[in-house]
Amino acid sequence: MEKAKGRASRPKILVIRPGALGDTLMLAPAFKFLHTDYHLMVAGRRPGIEILSPISEQSFDMDQAPWHNLFTSKPSPRGLTDPVPDLVICFLSDKGGQVKRNLKAYYPDSDIHVFPALPHPGRSIHASLHILECMMDAGLPLDPEALFQEALRSPVLEGSGHASRRLVLLHPGSGSRKKNLPLSFWKGLFERIMKTSTAAGLEPVFLLGPAEQDLERRFHQKIKLTHTSKGLLETLQKAALFIGHDSGPTHLAAMMGLSTIALFKNTDPVLWHPLGPKVMVFKVIEKEGLVVDFPLLCSKRG
């Protein structure tokens, strides 16, 4: 599919990627390049689809009707989207081919492609590069490696230029507790930053979202609660530094161009390291529940 000329004639593309915030954000490098020449529609979950809104035309929440019909043996006659896409690119597991059959039933005149959500086991590449390669294979005019490298060099998403960036945000949670370091580590880090940040005019704050609500009562330090994508973006815009696990907010901070420190415990940094010009990735080594080392794996400083 060639690039369109003029907004009125833009081809319509539906990209389906159900998943958490970090999974959805892996679409951003491709969307940033394509959104001016294509009518981009994304089907996924909040808050990721909301955060992609500046570089997509429409978004659809797959937790709402009628999207469950995509996975049933008898799809509803009601359509999934309006307008009808010219091209559908779906990222999810479809071993039996049910999803692809349903997509063909809904969109008989559309070009439909279904890809695995992540690279095949044994292929060590970044999740976003995998998406770029798949979208190129679907016919879009993408240079995957060039766009991936661009995402490492410059912010993919806008929003880091705030007049008073003085917060040091510490995000002690993630979508999986297996990724998380002990709260004692985060409390100790908070105290160390507090001792050194005052003179620089910085303020350390714990960032807690819906996945960390149960942690609120266990902190006595300063807390910033965010329950919406707007609240998260507004908080990040005030930050000078973000420190977090392999999590959606960490990926978002990096893509916004914030100085970001990512702590990887048991996930693969090659597959999931945050994309951005000011990112440092550390591999956490624990022994008997205590952090004993965290060697620097990579550093990007724009």
Image (cartoon, rainbow, N blue to C red):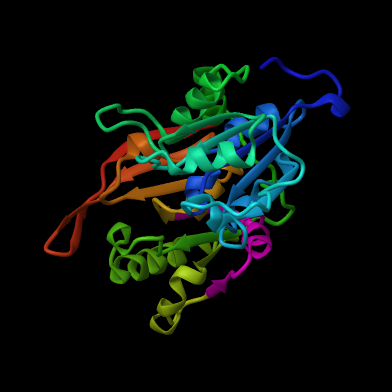
Instruction: Tell me where the magenta segment starts and ends, as one range.
Output: 223-243
Residue 61, image x, y percentages: 62, 57
Image point (36%, 71%), residue name: 187
In front: 77, or 154?
A: 77
Image point (62%, 58%), residue name: 66
Say which quadrant the N terminus sits in: top right
Image point (68%, 49%), residue name: 79
Q: Position of 131 compared to 4: left or right?
A: left
The quadrant holding residue 98 is: top left
Say which quadrant the C terminus sits in: top right
Image point (60%, 30%), residue name: 30
Residue 110 lies, with reference to residue 281, above or below; the image says above
- Report whether residue 19 is seen: no
In front: 138, or 259?
A: 138
> Residue lying farthest left?
288
Residue 206, image x, y percentages: 49, 68
In front: 288, or 294?
A: 288
